[in-house]
């Protein structure tokens, strides 16, 4: 019983990381209906930036915030410079661009920071009052960071004029232009937010999986599975899906297929959702009157 | 009085295909101008060309400013509100959010709050349904929402694309009455595209007749209504 609880709770902890990745994917998917396959590598690269900042002597939290700002700006620039020219290109062209970005960031990280595995600090002490029998302080803290980010993103989209404009631009670009919204900039902002959300995932994952250029490969797949499971057009659903996938992955690894075949659980979830319920558990089914 | 909107030799294209072949048009400040014509004459395209939603050529001035080279967002920011065909409401957002988006470009917060009240005054139904998703409104309510959202811009010129389309006659009568009141009370100028020529000429003080991308006739609404050919082709009596 204790072992089972242990598996579930540590599943929730990794699930928090998948949830952040899922949220990043949803932020871009909502606006463009494309899945950014480079999301994981962008997050990995941001994590290297955080590592470099910490190495340069910055305390953890300032480095964390500075990394978010850099990732945000990077996301905006990538959208304006690299993605924008493929605005009206076929979907496959965009997919090629994403895969190109993925390999560029992967190689660039290896080139700049080498492929040697590095340890990455956790901001949460090894022993702290918020650690429990089933979860380490880092795991608890990481879930708290994920939830805090979710609340911030929600508040931004729900309560600010800019958030409303971004939702409008994602839904109906033509009408958005007619009320004066600069739709192109809204897409760039979406990329910036997604890059920042991904950076959170990377920085929370790195203390567990260690820092190396391929660290986000599996995590991106799990995050994608989580987003699909929860509903890729619904941020709440996607985050919840991320947590569910984390737990399922751990249980499957512990009791069903063993640790070596864990990743297949993610693929089974992806295929299963697409076959049984393509809109996901909490995907919107639009109600309209005709 | 100088015209509020003035187009000279306006051409518009869908891809390589020309749809407007050089239209001259004026909208008077404070007036209502109607665009009449059969399907495919280029009425909707003319409205889209004003808002830079299609590729266009020719001169076009609004309130003494050249619109050439401006994108849709910038044309809107000058005070031209477009109620597009199909209404273009944000179906997943609430009525209130739709209206807030209408005022997105405005910085004068207190005036925006007043305008909410004014717009709800014209369309009390929208106040009742302000928390409802726009997609769940009836056709007439959606048309009201589209007009209300355009008013939230505090526009100088309102472009209306077939506001009567697909609506019951009573609802149409309602909406046209409100449009008349808005024009009278707010001094908002209007350029209105309408299939129903009788309806349009009843509201407008000037009208243009478009045929295959050219303006073939223009004049006061009364003169156009009295024209033998127009009466036979478009008014049906």
Image (cartoon, coloured by chain):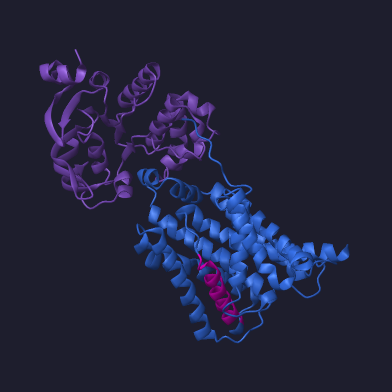
Chain colours: A blue, B purple
Asked if residue B219 shows in the view, the reply is: yes
Residue farthest right in this picture = A1
Using residue B204 as the reference point, say whether residue A231 is left or right of it.
right
Q: Residue at x 58, y 77 (%)?
A: A214
Q: Which residues are magenta?
A: A37-54
Main SS, magenta residues: helix
Q: Residue at x 49, y 47 (%)?
A: A164
Give the percent coordinates (x, y) of residue B129: 53, 29
Give the percent coordinates (x, y) of residue A15: 69, 62
Asked if residue B64 shows in the view, the reply is: no
Residue A146, above or below B81: below
Residue A251, above or below B183: below
Residue A284, above or below A262: above
Q: Residue at x 33, y 34 (%)?
A: B85
Q: Quadrant of the N terminus of chain A?
A: bottom right
Asked whether A164 falls inside the magenta stretch, the response is no
Give the percent coordinates (x, y) of residue A209: 67, 76
């Amino acid at each position: 019983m204790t072992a089972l609880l242990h598996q579930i709770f540590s599943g929730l902890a990794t699930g928090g990381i998948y949830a952040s990745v899922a949220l990043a994917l949803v932020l871009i998917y909502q606006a463009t209906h494309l899945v950014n396959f480079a999301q994981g590598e962008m997050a990995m690269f941001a994590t290297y930036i955080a590592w470099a900042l910490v190495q340069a002597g910055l305390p953890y939290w300032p480095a964390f915030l500075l990394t978010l700002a850099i990732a945000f700006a990077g996301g905006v620039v990538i959208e304006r410079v690299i993605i924008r020219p493929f605005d009206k290109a076929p979907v496959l062209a965009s997919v090629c661009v994403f895969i190109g970005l993925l390999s560029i960031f992967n190689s660039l990280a290896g080139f700049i920071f080498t492929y040697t595995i590095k340890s990455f600090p956790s901001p949460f002490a090894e022993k702290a009052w918020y650690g429990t029998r089933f979860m380490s302080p880092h795991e608890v803290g990481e879930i708290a960071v994920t939830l805090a980010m979710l609340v911030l993103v929600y508040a931004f989209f729900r309560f600010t004029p800019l958030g409303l404009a971004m939702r409008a631009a994602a839904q109906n670009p033509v009408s958005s232009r007619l009320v004066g919204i600069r739709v192109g900039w809204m897409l760039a902002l979406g990329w910036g937010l997604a890059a920042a959300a991904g950076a959170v995932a990377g920085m929370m994952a790195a203390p567990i999986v260690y820092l190396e250029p391929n660290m986000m490969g599996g995590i991106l797949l799990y995050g994608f599975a989580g987003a699909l499971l929860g509903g890729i057009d619904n941020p709440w659903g996607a985050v919840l899906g991320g947590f569910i996938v984390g737990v399922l992955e751990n249980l499957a690894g512990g009791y069903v297929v063993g640790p070596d075949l864990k990743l297949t659980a993610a693929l089974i979830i992806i295929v299963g959702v697409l076959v049984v319920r393509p809109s996901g558990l909490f995907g919107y089914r639009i109600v309209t009157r005709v | 009085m100088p015209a509020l909107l003035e187009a000279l030799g306006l051409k518009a294209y869908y891809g390589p295909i020309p749809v407007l072949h050089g239209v001259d048009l004026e909208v008077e400040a404070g007036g209502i101008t109607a665009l009449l014509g059969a399907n495919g004459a280029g009425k909707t395209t003319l409205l889209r060309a004003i808002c830079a939603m299609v590729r266009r050529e020719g001169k076009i001035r609004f309130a003494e400013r050249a619109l050439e080279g401006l994108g849709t967002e910038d044309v809107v920011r000058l005070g031209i509100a477009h109620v597009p065909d199909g209404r273009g409401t944000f179906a997943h957002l609430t009525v209130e959010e739709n209206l807030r988006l209408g005022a997105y470009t405005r910085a004068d917060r207190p005036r925006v709050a007043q305008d909410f009240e004014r717009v709800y005054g014209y369309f009390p139904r929208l106040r009742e349904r302000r928390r409802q998703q726009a997609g769940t409104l009836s056709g007439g309510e959606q048309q009201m929402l589209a007009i209300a959202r355009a008013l939230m811009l505090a526009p100088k010129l309102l472009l209306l694309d077939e506001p009567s389309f697909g609506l019951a006659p009573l609802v149409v009568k309602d909406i046209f009455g409100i449009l008349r009141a808005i024009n009278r009370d707010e001094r908002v100028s209007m350029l209105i595209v309408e299939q129903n020529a009788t309806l349009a000429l009843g509201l407008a003080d000037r009208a243009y007749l478009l045929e295959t991308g050219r303006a073939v006739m223009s004049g006061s609404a009364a003169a156009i209504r009295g024209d033998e050919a127009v009466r036979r082709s478009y008014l049906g009596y």
